[in-house]
Amino acid sequence: MTDREIDRVIEMAWEDRTPFEAIDAQFGLSESQVIKLMRKELKESSFKMWRKRVNSGVSQKHLQKRNSEISRFKCSRQRSISNNKIT
């Protein structure tokens, strides 16, 4: 992966409403691969804070935790991002 792709994966991983499935669809990385990437790229304290948030009730990183009315990966008003493979 390029540095730009790694930065985008990290950005998506930090976003509460972006599920792991969206990262998998765009970059082919499973949840466990994203966790390994985050562990490698983040400071230890940042990684722990991210994991705590992902496993809390605040984050909707897992589709099972999401409201069933949400069926998209991004806000309908969000402009398409040219680096994404899905627009």
Image (tube, helix red, strand yellow):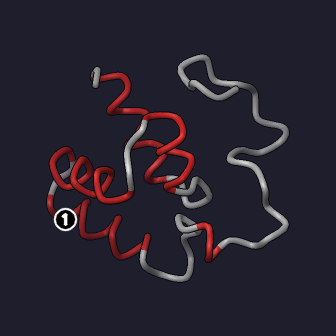
Q: Which residue is mark 1?
A: 45
Q: Residues within 10 Å of mark 1 (few under 14, many from 20)?
A: few
The residue at 26%/51% (across/down) is: 38
Determine whether 37 is above or below 19 in the image.
above
Front-lying residue, 23 or 57? 23
Q: x, y (%) of residue 67?
A: 76, 73
Q: Element at badge 1?
A: helix
**Residue 36, image quadrant:** bottom left
Q: The residue under label 1 is which amino acid type?
A: Ser
The residue at 47%/81% (across/down) is: 56
Determine whether 8 is above or below 11 in the image.
above
Is residue 30 rendered to the left or right of residue 66? left
Is residue 73 rendered to the left or right of residue 35? right
The residue at 38%/58% (across/down) is: 31
Front-lying residue, 26 or 39? 26
Determine whether 2 is above or below 40 in the image.
above
Is residue 23 rendered to the left or right of residue 2? right
Q: x, y (%) of residue 7?
A: 36, 33
